[in-house]
Image (cartoon, rainbow, N blue to C red):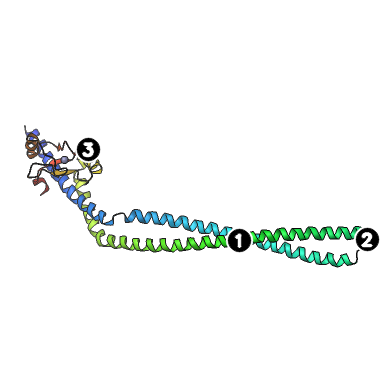
Amino acid sequence: MEKKQSEENKVKQNLEQLAKLQVILSEIDSIQQLRGDLPLEIERLEKALEMLIEDVTKKSNEMDQNNANFNENNAIIEKNKSTIEVWEKKLKSAKDNSEYRTLTDNIEFLNLDINDKEKKNDELLENLQNIKDTIAEKKIEETTIKEDLQSKKEKLDNIIKETEKKELELSKKAEAIQTKMAKEKELLNTFFKIRNKIFNHKAIVALQPNEVCGGCFNKIPPQIQVEILQNKKIIYCEHCGCMITTKEAFN
Ligand SMILES: [Zn+2]
């Protein structure tokens, strides 16, 4: 009899502790709700910025390669031109037709090569402009993202600054209750499982004066109400699954 009594007492105490824990956790929830989507938004923007910077680096490398090819072609063109100049001089003093033919063939070959390289350089110039345009666009995008990121970070920082002390206090209180309830591991696990599953994260609620569950506001059958008021065992709402206890447990 005595043992049963102490068991029942323990249930009551546990319910009171869980109610206390729930009140604290709900306060932490509302603090975190103030932050809204900001942490996620910041993460998304940081990723976008990282990708953008990567893109700009790739484009800059492409531009360097483009410029190197252009310069290389120019050097060949210049070299060809001076070779042609030399050969044109030689042409005037060609000893025979054969030498003349060889020289004109060589000059023609070099001229074709010059044409080819000039055409390639035109393409490179056009490409260079495209790359520059792309980089400019990406830089504008980068600035926009950076500004957005900055303002969202400031907003979040302000919210955190205003609430972090309070949140820390609450977290410590919540931890203290959990430490106190260390022997009730299973009950705590159930509590947190319900908390994670339920939409308002309230794992334990009070029976309302109008005989409804404080979580889902569905009517509680009279027999269950009696059991809740007795505090002898843990009662779960048959509609939403949360624990239901007395209003007094929350005091
Ligand atoms: Zn309910």
Q: Earlier in the sequence, mark 1 or mark 3?
A: 1
Q: Position of residue 21 (x, y in %)?
A: 18, 48
Question: Farthest residue toward the right?
Answer: 95
The residue singled out by tag 3 in the image is 186
Mark 3 crowdedness (10 Å alpha carbons): few <14, some 14-19, many ≥20: few
The residue singled out by tag 2 in the image is 96
Mark 1 crowdedness (10 Å alpha carbons): few <14, some 14-19, many ≥20: few
Residue type pointed to by label 3: Glu
Between the residue at mark 1 and the residue at mark 3, the CA separation in whole angstroms equals 70 Å
Q: Quadrant for residue 217, please give it.
A: top left
Q: Secondary structure at mark 1?
A: helix
Q: Nearer the viewer, residue 190 or 224?
A: 224
Q: Earlier in the sequence, mark 1 or mark 2?
A: 2
Residue type pointed to by label 1: Glu
* Residue located 56% across and 60% down the image: 130
Residue type pointed to by label 2: Asp
Question: Is 135 placed left or right of 48 in the picture?
Answer: right
Mark 2 crowdedness (10 Å alpha carbons): few <14, some 14-19, many ≥20: few
Q: Earlier in the sequence, mark 2 or mark 3?
A: 2
Residue 198 bears which disc, if any?
A: none
CB under 8 Å between discs 2 and 3:
no
